[in-house]
Amino acid sequence: MRHRIANVSSRARSVVITTVLVSCSVVALVAACNQTMGLSANDPALIARGKDIFRFDTFGDETFWSDTLRMHEVIRSAVDPTTALSVGLKVDTDSLPPAVVQGIQNGSISLTSPATTVALLKLNAVVGVKGTVTTLNGQDVLTRVGITCALCHSTVDNSFSAGIGKRLDGWPNHDLNPGAIIALSSALTPAQKAVYNSWGKGKYDARYNFDGLNGPSVIPPAYGLNGVSSITYTGDGAELAYWNRYVAVTQMHGHGSWVEPRLSENVQNPPDMVTSKLAALQAYQLSIQSPPAPTGSFDATAAARGRVVFDGAGKCATCHLGTLFTDAPGRLHSPTEVVGEPEPNGAPSFASRSATKMYRSTPLRGLWQHAPYFHNGVSTTLDAVVELYNTRKTLNLTTQQKADLVQYLKSL
Ligand code: HEC
Ligand code: HEC
């Protein structure tokens, strides 16, 4: 990471280094100190920059979403706000001037006109979508469009109406149907469109464009990851920046480079608009806490009993260890140990398509917020998760133990 830190000004660099030394001398865990870029997570300026990148940076991916997929043409001709909301796109009210809020409220701004979508893009109010709007003969025209990290990893609190509200960064957008959105492009073959349309809401296949296989995974949260040194469902990277680079270059199709010898991947898309941003981007994500379970959403007494089941009869704590609830990076698990496989619909093993061929014990934070569960979403509720473990691992838990365990999971 030396070359990345070198991009930070020398004053900021000395701050970063001081933070590193202080936290490493105080924190006993060597593993935490090894997390090179995570250590700068306390620098407010770096975090603020990372927030901006997370929300608004396309890494130049307009060359893909506009030049190749022609998405700007689709949006300006056919995607009115109602359609956009129906495929799970979100609108950020903090970007809207009061007159626009009022117009939406009193109906004078049409939510069934693509021109309104263009107006929202001009205001930078569509979460995760960055548009360039040019005024031609007095008319606003969407000329380019790109996507940002926030598209999949942010949602809104619906405080204005469904899909419209204040941003919640790090919360996976499980209303979003990325496949259905991509399939709107006229640049794809019918066979490709069929694959994209098969994924469904809240899922995306980050390997399809390499191996041509179809087995989407659930969009995971990008919160609660501070201290986790094993990234993705399959633990492919030691830090967030590993995967952030992968997605920015190979999925968002931003400009930069990606090399992964374990999968014989080498993607070069100059000029590099990714590397210099990774430290800030990582620092921001590490600063996002997992949202605590809302008061009243679980029974605290039952949860306390459930914790005993988690640590004891349920054997959950043999893999979901410590405060982060994971035994990674020390240990990953083969597909045969994991109740999330076999894959639904005869899809190929997700792990087999990864660099490690294994699964990471998922850190269990904010579970109440991000159903469905497991990499492929096979369990839609926490009751189903517990039932699956009980059956597959022959735990013989009583009805009471199962119910208590669910309350505990809801409390995390
Ligand atoms: C099109 C949707 C999409 C976009 C855009 C996207 N991601 Fe993801 N992200 C996913 C999916 C799906 C996974 C799960 C992949 C896996 O585990 O194999 C994932 C995994 C992750 C993880 C791993 C979480 C964990 O528990 O280890 C992080 C962190 C993350 N993304 C951050 C980002 C950042 C930062 C960006 C922007 C550079 C980004 N993502 C862009 C869909 C997306
Ligand atoms: C052998 C190790 C192991 C044991 C034992 C284990 N888990 Fe897991 N757990 C994992 C792995 C690995 C995953 C990721 C699997 C996947 O995504 O398909 C996982 C995923 C999960 C998830 C899904 C999290 C998410 O965000 O998708 C939950 C919930 C969970 N485990 C709860 C439990 C509970 C409750 C128990 C005890 C009854 C338990 N686990 C026992 C290894 C284990």
Image (cartoon, grey):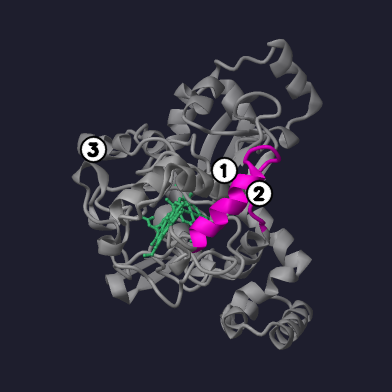
Q: Which mark is residue 288?
A: none
Q: Secondary structure at mark 1?
A: helix
Q: Could you give the CA–CA distance between mark 3 and mark 2, rounded to whole angstroms?
A: 41 Å
Q: Which residue is mark 3?
A: 189
Is the residue marked by circle 1 packed among few (<14), some (14-19), or many (20+) residues within 10 Å?
some
Task: Tell me, for residue 291, which label it has, or none.
Answer: 2
Q: In the figure, is residue 76 to the left or right of 182? A: right
The residues bearing labels 1 and 3 have C-alpha atoms spaced at a distance of: 36 Å
In reply to whether residue 304 is colored magenta, the answer given is yes
- Rendered location of residue 22, percent (x, y): 76, 84
Residue 56 visible from this viewpoint: no
Q: Amino acid at mark 2?
A: Pro
Residue at position x 57%, y 67% in the image = 278
Camera-nearest residue between 175 and 6: 175
Q: Secondary structure at mark 3?
A: loop
Say what amino acid the circle numbered 3 marks: Thr
Q: Residues within 10 Å of mark 2 (few under 14, many from 20)?
A: some
Q: Are marks 2 and 1 in contact (CB under 8 Å)?
A: yes
Report the mark closest to the observer, 1 or 3.
1
Provide residue 253's location: percent of width, then percent of height. Answer: 43, 54
